[in-house]
Image (cartoon, rainbow, N blue to C red):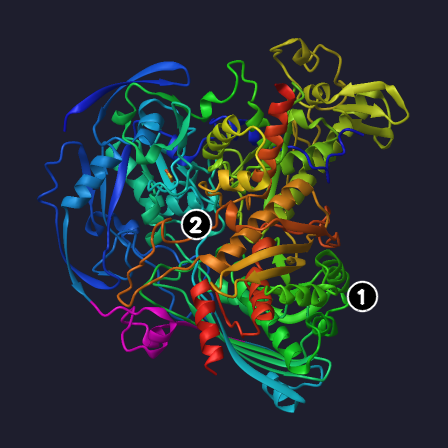
Amino acid sequence: MTTRLFGEPVRRREDPRLLTGRGRYLDDIGEGAYEVAFVRSPHAHARIRDIDVSAAIDVEGLVAIHTWEDLPARLAEPLPLLIPHPALTHGRTAYPLARDVVRHVGEPVVMVVARDRYLAEDVCGLIEVDYEPLAPVVGIEEATRAEALVHEDVPGNVGAHLVQEVRSATGLGAREAIEAAPYRLEFGLDIERSASMPLEGRGVHARWDAGDRSLRVHSSTQTSTSVRMAIAAKLDLPLPQVEVVAPDVGGGFGVKIVHPWPEEVLVPWAAMLLGHEVRWTEDRREHFVSSAHERAQTHHVRVGFDERGRVLGLDVTIVHDHGAYTPYGIIVPIITSTQLPGPYKLGAYRVEFSSVYTNTVQVTPYRGAGRPQAVFCMERTMDRVAEHLGLDRTAVREANFIQPEEFPYDQGLIFQDGRPLIYDSGDYPESLRRLKDLVGWDDFPALKEQAAKQGRRIGIGLGCYVEGTGVGPYEGGHVQVTSDGRVHVSTGLTSQGQGHETVFAQIAASELGVPIERVSVVTGDTRRFGYAVGTFASRAAVMSGNAIALACGKVREKALRIAADALEADPGDLEIVEGEVRVVGSPGTALPLATVAVLSNPLRYAFDEEAGRATQFAGTSSPDRPPVAEGDEPGLEGRDYYSPIRSTFASGMHAAIVETDPLTAEIRILRYAVVHDCGNLINPMIVEGQIHGGVAQGVGGALYERMVYDEHGQLLNASFMDFLMPYATEIPRVETAHLQTPSPLNPLGVKGAGEAGVIPVSAVIASAVEDAEGIRIDRMPISPSELFDLRRAASSG
Amino acid sequence: MRDIAITLTVNGIVRRATVPGRRLLSDCLRHDLGLTGTHVGCEHGVCGCCTVLLDGQPVRSCLMFAATADGHEVTTVEGLAEPDGTLSPVQRAFAECHGLQCGFCTPGFLCTVTALLRDNPAPGEEEVVEGISGNLCRCTGYQNIVRAVHRAAEILAEER
Ligand code: FES
Ligand code: FES
């Protein structure tokens, strides 16, 4: 059947426009708009003494200059703390424009509106801000020493502190279980800062219609519905007067889920004030110093285990550097703490984290969101245990796996959605078996020996993970069949290049039985769908996918009911094939969906011949019943929501073979293998693409990317010249195999796939480099010079 | 600042603009000529999003003043398809091989690859990787882009 599109590698419907330059990204919108630039703090920590604009006001083309003092009441308050948590006792957020104190380089101080961006930047250059520098706090060590404070009223720089503990079956706490274990190890593991770094930065465009007092905002965001609510609240506008649209978005990877950014409220405010369209497009340096970073965390691990490597007790203490503010709460360290156990049954587990302030860019989720750190921690621990016992690394993992018959498996923790962390399904032993086959794990020692004979150093490593995906609270879908037979699908959730238009069209076409060409999909436009949460946590396919499937179910049911009436058949005998309602077994008796749509909407006035069939004298409606039955609605459309009880849990395992240069310490990835299980696949081509992209970001994070702050809190590498994102020359070919363990939690049986690729890469590469070198790797990323230094340190004893 | 009157042939059409001397070619194409298919990812010459063909050669339009392009021929992503809208072999190959996700880097890759295959119609694996190694993509991990380049070479050969 041609309409069975679910599971097929259907070509992307986004591509024709994106390949011909007809995509519509933020900076492509609103030609002629005034443009905005910001004076941003050059200091990591300083008090603002004075702002002098006198030299700037004569610049030709200047429209307006604003500082914090100009902001109206609600806008002058700190930005919202999006995800409060009882453990976040000292949450702090920034003002849209700095008030008195700046807390990181890049914090916006003055907003300049001008005829174009060049002029706005000229003006910025002429504004004098007088700062009194304060002592900056940079890095986790300085933060915990707390000799200086980022926020005067936050003692010890500690924003949050949280302990979770799962006792063993026999009632032992993790520390007791470790003490009682036959073997014990203790060590530290660190991960540095990186960032999402989409190629399109952030951006906002606003148009105020003074006539009907309505505001239309475009933002390069991962959540248009929530930006809309934030703008309405901050600008004191009735919600129906504000619409927010996410246009084509040039990548997000997490950073664009944060909202409202200062610019997202300031630009609309300026548009209202000036009665003119206003646009701000972030430049690359701004993205480095004023959006968000992620990953910096230190971990202290204590583990107790038995002779087979079974973990009897694990105790992890984490310090998380969340930068200057906490708009996104403490989601990242919560995810690290709760996803750390991965596919394993740990005897007892205790995890404690402190989240600390530093005078650096704020930290919010970046693809993987705390999981790369968690997996680095758990998988490096598994490797240590294996080494200590002289066992194969895969054997130790096998000894700890949750078994397929043990699902649903309750890890005993509270996940990022505030709900119990219960794995829905998976088959970890089978994943590992496939991974070993794919990469040739058992043959590797021979390969290594052979390489050694030629003077080459190679090593193999692996990493396993479980990823909570498809978190709630909900998403919705709306499906409408119009009288021309077209199917219009909308969902409030946004897209950043994942191909949502394609996969949602596949779902709708499959569920409704219509050719995909007739389906169009709109995402992230509040004019079409007002209720949504956003795109993060690998949730789009699970949440909106299922909501759209449910909405299609409603449409289908209604179509069958109306068609049954018209065809004088039983609805149970009908099916929808190729956009026609047919009597099963007698394809001659059919009614196009277009006609069903006409009949669904009783009319008084005909606008074309087809519509005439639904008018009052056409004889299509029974005179004994009201034209629209009680409880029914006109039109062939349906809206539904999907709100799962809890997250689904995707899983996967990666392995890599690396070669290290004996002389230069250069690290090259020779092979990279991925076994991935995200439940049923909607479009395998798109899932593969997500994995490739994720692995590439993981490789960047493992070998190249880091944010280098000096002791003054200056970000030294805030450009693509110095922050090394991998090019094609750095990324290995990824070999993939899929396992499909459907999720029992949702009708489509899907789990999320967006983040998976990035999660275990640092753990895998560290494991492989360690295997090649015989030198312990306990912090990532690792550069050739670091490996060189480690070699030197190792050889000097 | 005195404005400069320039004339460029863009995608085969003669276009005129009056620009300040400091106006970047990327901004001129995007905002003066309305060709927003050329994207800007860094404005310091590293990402390659802004790549266009200047007299057939790939250049970074963010590293060039519009005034410098006066009198030259420019091809942007909008000019790659046939006049009737048929996608070029390179564009088709990118669609077929899923060589794009968000599409922000794509115009730069398409221009780069178009020139690459014109100069070297049957590149080997290393030549392909080397040939696109001046363009960043944050979404695809490059694997499908590399595949698309090979596929485009095939299509070009078939259609020759
Ligand atoms: S925008 Fe020109 S190279 Fe990045
Ligand atoms: S497709 Fe998004 S940056 Fe390349």
Q: Which residues are magenta?
A: A134-163
Residue A177: percent from left, percent from top: 64, 86
What amino acid is labelled 1 in the image?
Glu
Disc 1 secondary structure class? helix
Image mark 1: chain: A
Location of residue A594 in the rendering, given as x and y in whole percent from the top left corner: 70, 20
Disc 2: which chain? Answer: A
Can residue A631 be seen here? The reply is no
Q: Quadrant of residue A386?
A: bottom right
Q: Is residue B70 visible?
A: yes
Q: Is mark 2 within 8 Å of ligand 2?
A: no
Q: Amino acid at mark 2?
A: Met
Quadrant for the N terminus of chain A in the image: top right
With A452 as the anchor, is B109 left or right in this view? left
Q: Secondary structure at mark 2?
A: loop
Tags 1 and 2 both on a single chain: yes
- Of residue A11 and residue A747, the one placed in the foreground of this image is A11
Q: Is residue A510 left or right of residue A288?
A: right
Q: In which image quadrant can residue A443 be found?
A: bottom right
Q: Is residue A390 magenta-colored?
A: no
Give the camera-side residue of A661 and B47: A661
In the image: residue A514, left or right of residue A89: right
Judge left or right: residue B49 versus residue A116: right
Q: Nearer the viewer, residue A438 or A543?
A: A438
Q: Which mark is residue A197?
A: 2
Q: Earlier in the sequence, mark 1 or mark 2?
A: 2
